[in-house]
Amino acid sequence: MSHKLAFVGFGTVGQGLAEILLNKKDELREILNEDIQVVAISDAQKGSLYHSDGLDLERVLAVVREAGNLNKYPDSPELRRGWDSLQTIRQSNADTVIEVTFTNVHTGQPAIDHCREAFINRKNVVTTNKGPIALAYDELSSLAEKNGVQWGFEGTVMSGTPSLRMPLVSLAGNRILSIQGILNGTTNYILTKMEEGLTYDAALKQAQQNGFAEADPTSDVEGYDAMYKIIILAKVIMGVPLKPEEVVRHGIQNLTNDDILSAKKQRKRWKLIAKVVRTQHGIQASVQPETLDLDHPLASVQGVENAITYDCDLSGPVTLVGAGAGKVETGFALLIDIINLIRRCKESQVILGA
Ligand code: HSE
């Protein structure tokens, strides 16, 4: 038996997951008692492949590494090429769609349409795109439920650091009073490097070269990326819907080296803090640069690292520190969802068969 995946989008994150699936094939079979098989890949730039019995992932990764596209993957009688994302979602025999396309963070497209199409076609979705959760959570959750499928989006906040599953599972029973954190690796990296003496532009360039800045880095530096993450946390963890215009948002683009140095002289540090707080009148959410005392738990989070503190009514503050971006880390986030999804499918089969 195998669980079949279709990749829609095959950029850095998708390839990160494919490498993990290849390198951990035996371990995963042991954990899940079944194989995970990739049957389709459709990418707007790299081309597309579909084979109902599974693709050879080692060959896929080798041709993409070599030529930057899927054209040189060997032909065979049953191999199909040229399916676009929607055809792949509709016509492949995948159980689960891995939705990792380049998506416009403000419209959530094409990821929202891909999720809709997958659910209508009774396929599960695992995604790292923030748009579908930040902008269409209720609609998509109902559609998934109506069609008896699941969706996973652990990687939308803090990549493979379980910022969603940890509070949902391990802090269950608490009322979460507030959430605050450093949720964008690019800006934290820039601030760290500026403190070391680099200019803003040089630090941003390094973040882009290292591959953690968004395709359009204004999303990082102007606070949009962190804003969508706080909207996801408010909805998924606190059950509170927020619209983008309800979040106070300021980026780091106007901070100068002088600002950073004068904070340093006062034993403080600038951080881009994202927070959502329950108040007597509802909820307040913001993303903005703040100066923290050096002994503040979030002040020591440096470079691309992220951190998040959940203030809970029973367990008090709980802080999680870890990666917030990266090829392997975000690939792993997809894997956490896939493993949990397969386990839940097996549990429901057991219950149905009881
Ligand atoms: N550009 C994002 C960051 C990637 O720097 O944190 C993960 O969402």
Image (spheres, helix red, strand yellow):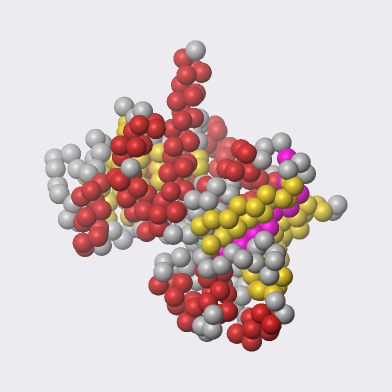
Residue 101 visible in rendering: yes
Using residue 131 as the reference point, say whether residue 8 is left or right of it. left
Location of residue 336 with respect to 34 vertically, above or below: below
- Please name the residue shown 41% across and 51% down the image: 331
- Please name the residue shown 40% across and 57% down the image: 327
Location of residue 262 with respect to 140 vertically, above or below: below
- Percent x, y for residue 197? 54, 84
- Please name the residue shown 46% across and 42% down the image: 336
The magenta segment: 174-184
Using residue 253 as the reference point, say whether residue 112 is left or right of it. left
- Residue at the far top in the pictured view: 354
- Percent x, y for residue 173? 71, 36
Using residue 121 as the reference point, say whether residue 286 is left or right of it. right
- Percent x, y for residue 138? 61, 43
- Please name the residue shown 51% across and 65% down the image: 304
Q: Nearer the viewer, residue 242 or 157?
A: 157
Q: Is residue 171 magenta?
A: no
Q: Is residue 182 magenta?
A: yes
Location of residue 136 with respect to 288 vertically, above or below: above
